[in-house]
Amino acid sequence: MTKISGFSKLSKLDKINWVCDNYLSENSNAKDIITQYLNDDKKLQKLHDEFAENTISNYYLPFGVAPNFCIDGEMFCIPMVIEESSVVAAASKAAKFWLDKGGFKTKVLNTTKVGQVHFKFSGDFNKLKTLFDEQKSKFFEDASSITKNMEKRGGGILDIQLVDKTELLSSYYQLHCTFETVDAMGANFINSCLEQFGKTLEDIYQPEFDVEVILCILSNYVPECLVRAEVSCPLHLLGKTEKEALNFAQRFKYAIDIANVEPYRAVTHNKGIMNGIDAVVLATGNDFRAIEACAHAYASKEGRYKSLTHASIVDDVFRFWIDVPIAVGTVGGLTSLHPLVKVALQMLNNPNAKDLMKIIAVAGLAQNFAAVNSLVTTGIQKGHMKMHLLNILNQFEATPEEKEQAIEYFKTHTATHSEAVDFITRIRK
Amino acid sequence: MTKISGFSKLSKLDKINWVCDNYLSENSNAKDIITQYLNDDKKLQKLHDEFAENTISNYYLPFGVAPNFCIDGEMFCIPMVIEESSVVAAASKAAKFWLDKGGFKTKVLNTTKVGQVHFKFSGDFNKLKTLFDEQKSKFFEDASSITKNMEKRGGGILDIQLVDKTELLSSYYQLHCTFETVDAMGANFINSCLEQFGKTLEDIYQPEFDVEVILCILSNYVPECLVRAEVSCPLHLLGKTEKEALNFAQRFKYAIDIANVEPYRAVTHNKGIMNGIDAVVLATGNDFRAIEACAHAYASKEGRYKSLTHASIVDDVFRFWIDVPIAVGTVGGLTSLHPLVKVALQMLNNPNAKDLMKIIAVAGLAQNFAAVNSLVTTGIQKGHMKMHLLNILNQFEATPEEKEQAIEYFKTHTATHSEAVDFITRIRK
């Protein structure tokens, strides 16, 4: 048993030593590997250490860029943070493809955020409702010290509604609250408001009614914080000949239709979209778990898990678009702390939250276009394995000559991980 | 317009210069910031550059550790990569809480992976089916060069089924294929098999039937690649008094019940679970978009988006568990390339894929326990803002004295981002 008390209070070096002594004793290089990732600039390193707890090193994710994005007539070079090969290349390819076809068009449909106070109550709902309606303004008043600054920036509490959920769960009621948080992701603001609402709720109803607040928390499900991105062009631009163009468009649309009816496909289809979305979310210091949870729940909102993108061919025009909820901030949190996040935002011309929603949706759509394009033409493996092969070759510290040999060989052979390993072993014999 | 051709072929330095000249000209420090994150070890840096395309820097995510996890009787210190404050602290707290109550118990329920060949066909399904059944072995034979190595490791193709999907989409059929990929995530293996199945399908049916393969691709939806993690203890261990313990358990269970019936809550509830899951997925070099997509689709499988965790109180025993599909690998991909990933896996005693599924599920369950625990007791903001406050103070380069003052002040005041900014501005006047 390797139990420890007070670990979090140890210095970083002592933490590293403890981990190495207790869990990495078989690898004498472990400490060197952990520390070789630390930045020489001690102040910068301390800043990164303090983003989370028990930090012992920096985990590198590649910070890449995808140029040539034309969004609503403006040119962008999009920063992308992702460890998966092919994603940045695919985004760049899609950007260039659409560049001379009018680029990407976007529209923020809404920016409403959500939070809820969940509580138990076992009395007469009508009485509860009457009292709530009478005292509704008190919720706003009691939260005024929290909302003051947000209101100055044009945001605040939009509405508070009392909802009866007892059909789903015995004694379950909620305050369903909506917020506008402008350029902040708004999690702390919303949670602070909600915790105050919980107190106000108990103030209003106790002791006359037995109201028990269970939990107060923002919802990451924000179906109304929605953005649309789209591309469209005359059909004939999609191929060298009209026949080729029509064939491509029809196969492409059919692939989207499949993702719309088959959850096994939709999950992977949307996963590819999230490759693009998360890469920009990470680069701009936002929380990808929040974006992921919301996007996938949104994909399942009609009772069956569906595609987030859609395609149509009408009057010889091909159109491809995404509607996706994206709650992000461009102030607060990591956006103002992480030096590379600041640079990423500058690279995007310091967008406000709405602008960033648009750029992120475009990255998702571009990613999906590139993926489906590959899938309905050459297949996904050709491009993917080329990148993956390089990684495998690096693992074996292949020389430039060996790399060339391997790339040549796998032009005509199916490149799996084990085949690549076999190949490199073989040529070295 | 800042259009560029051949960007990917530029050297890294030329890429950085192009981005700085064209998109960061207003920030004269941009280049310094981008390059200060590069590693001095050129060979190591090159390795990281080649994980993805157009890489210009390293994006740091905190690499932290959560000690004191007892899983199936064995002690673990879990590596976690996450930029969000409180997550590693919460995991550590939950680990310690359960350490003297028997720890975490786990079970891998299944490890089946999925892939599909999606195709169009407009003839007689019975004839298609008859021919498929007659020629089924040909699919396995034609893929034998791809499956050979996987079979040596105990994996391979499990089954191939012909499925009629025409009720959902005109002319839509599929080969629904299942795989065992042992300790590999298996994406390349599965996709290579599927692309071969697509060729075999056309070989078998052409020219007698008009079969058009649309796309061949693995599914990230793997509801049968499932793991369970749980904790349980006698009710009275959950509080100082029996009454306190019962109250806590009931509130906790009610919070889980709410997440089960209310999608707005379920999304955030599961988002918190994914904080823990993704942190380990990242640290061990796996693909968090795949895990996210699958987990959330799984949460929606019954037609309404639900909680991934469950709680029960039966015979004075409190039980809390998660069933979650997790498809990960411990060989191939980044797991064998990224030096820090190798260390993370060593820290976990070099787990096979099943062991890693267990550890990841435990991290998710622990995270959820800590979050719900906070929510139904003190509220989420108290602990969260303490961490967040430190980040804000760092942003203002607060001195140790200023930090102390702020922590003291916000013990009795609601700490929002703007309140913290106001405070630091105020004390400096």
Image (spheres, coloured by chain):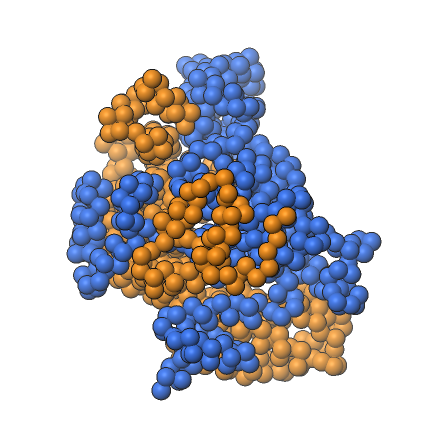
Chain colours: A orange, B blue
User: In the picture provided, is B199 more to the left or to the right than A26?
Assistant: left
Q: Quadrant of the N terminus of chain B?
A: bottom left
Q: In which quadrant of the rendered view does residue B360 lie? A: top right
User: In the picture provided, is A72 more to the left or to the right than B86?
Assistant: left
Q: Quadrant of the C terminus of chain B?
A: bottom left
What residue lies at 42% left-to-right and 15% top-to-bottom?
B203
Nearer-the-camera pick, A21 or A408? A21
Above or below: residue A410 compared with residue A135: above
Q: In which quadrant of the rendered view does residue A227 lie? A: bottom left
The x and y percentages for residue A354 are 36, 63
Above or below: residue B3 compared with residue A420: below
The x and y percentages for residue A254 are 42, 35
What residue lies at 51% left-to-right and 79% top-to-bottom?
B408
The x and y percentages for residue B181 are 52, 29
What residue lies at 58% left-to-right and 47% top-to-bottom?
B76
Whether residue A277 can be seen here: no
What residue lies at 55% left-to-right and 35% top-to-bottom?
B352
The x and y percentages for residue A229 are 35, 53
Whether residue B344 can be seen here: yes
Nearer-the-camera pick, A316 or B382? B382
Extreme residue toward the bottom, this view: B429
Extreme residue toward the right, this view: B315
